[in-house]
Amino acid sequence: MRLAVICFAAWIGGSGLAAELRFDFGATPAGQTPAGFRSLISGEGKPGEWKIVMDDVPSLFPPLVPGAAETAKKPVLAQVSQDITDERFPILLYEKETFGDFTFTTRFKTVSGKVEQMAGIVFRAQNETNYYVVRASSLGNTFRFYKVVNGERGTILGPEIAVPAGSWHEMTVECKGNKIRCLLNGKEAIPALTDSSFVSGKLGFWTKSDSVSYFSDSKITYTPREVSAQVLLRKLLEDYPRLVNVQIFVPGREPGTTRLIASKNMSEVGQTGGAIEHDIIANANIYYGKEKGTVSVVMPLRDRNGDAIAAMRVVMKSFAGQTEQNAIVRATPIVKEIQGKIQNLEDLVE
């Protein structure tokens, strides 16, 4: 099963680091749930049934020639189970990233439902009992926002507004700090909100009760969350600006793998480590390597119990007479500066 994300773009400009994700539901075979997502149930009743179906979706662009088809059959995400439990809220949460500040847009269509016909976005979700949601109702003709804290629903805000079933609409959520904006079909249908309950969290799709709802053309532009290791590394480089590179690797999600979570070169973050990094975390070994003009030393970072939890690579300019021993001596205080600021793996990845 292929991951549903087809695009990740990162850049550094006047506004700092930004990124974009687009969910390509065509990457998943019809009838299956997209990879990278997890189905949850908030409230009561049975979990949702989320899968890819084919549907006619209007083009995002005007036709190039008169008479051209205005819709096209394409894969969309659908919640198709029809449990009529009233306080039932199926959620499909994207698991691969945590979002703080972001703008998320998705097209949606309410298809059917005797009790409810709703579609929505759940965001800054901590779990199935703590999150924000904005949703549209075709039966109730409403567009609403509310938060759920420890399973308790807060004040419901939003207007009465027609959301015809069987038609595609667009929903947008924008979060900046504690400011939240909710748009329907490009218009700010709910006055801007201020709430500090959740500063970051997961994001996903939401329905209610027996609603059969479709989602398509979903994308998020966001400020990537900076892990603690990157913050520590940036401060380290203020003391050692002449280092060629510094990288920190932690165990990967799959057994026997590692992943790069911090680097002097930000474009490298997210890459997979190799056998050296895995060996250092598994066996607490030290690695030395030499290339033209540089030397590399890779050493373990340890937790409070002395166990290796990460691998730190220090790349330095070499000099005449450079040896493995003096390269390790040069790298040791650099590694110890990070080591002195952590006690466990969470201190690097949180």
Image (tube, rainbow, N blue to C red):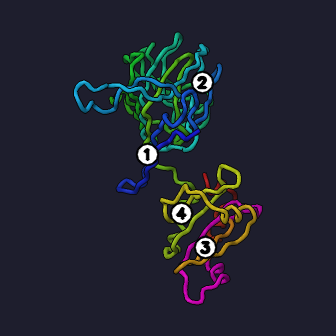
Residue nearer the viewer, 55 or 233: 55
The quarter of the picture where residue 109 lies is: top left
Helix or strand or loop: what does disc 4 sit on? Answer: strand
Q: What x and y, as percent, mark residue 268?
A: 51, 60
Who comes first in sequence, dot 2 or dot 1? 1
Please tell me which residue is depicted at 60% across the width and 24% down the height of the picture: 48
- Who is closer to the viewer here, 155 or 28? 28
Residue furthest out toward the left: 66
Q: Between marks 4 and 2, how big is the CA–CA gap?
A: 40 Å
Q: Quadrant of the N terminus?
A: top right
Percent across and percent down for residue 209 are 57, 17
Question: Which segment is the magenta one?
Answer: 301-330
Q: Is residue 236 above or below residue 343?
A: below
User: Which residue corresponds to the image point at 61% horizontal and 73% vertical from the top-left?
Assistant: 334
Say which quarter of the image contains residue 149.
top right
Q: Which mark is residue 201?
A: none
- Distance of label 2 from label 3 (alpha carbons): 51 Å
Tag of residue 49: 2
Circles 2 and 3, Cβ within 8 Å, touching? The answer is: no
Name the kind of residue labelled 3 in the image. Answer: Ile
Q: Is residue 95 left or right of residue 139?
A: right
Contact (Cβ within 8 Å) of mark 3 with mark 4:
no
Which residue is under mark 4? 263
Q: Residues within 10 Å of mark 2 (few under 14, many from 20)?
A: some
Q: Horizontally, is 214 left or right of 249 in the view?
A: left
Marks 3 and 4, the one that precedes in the sequence: 4
Q: Amino acid at mark 4?
A: Ser
Say which residue label 3 marks.
Answer: 334
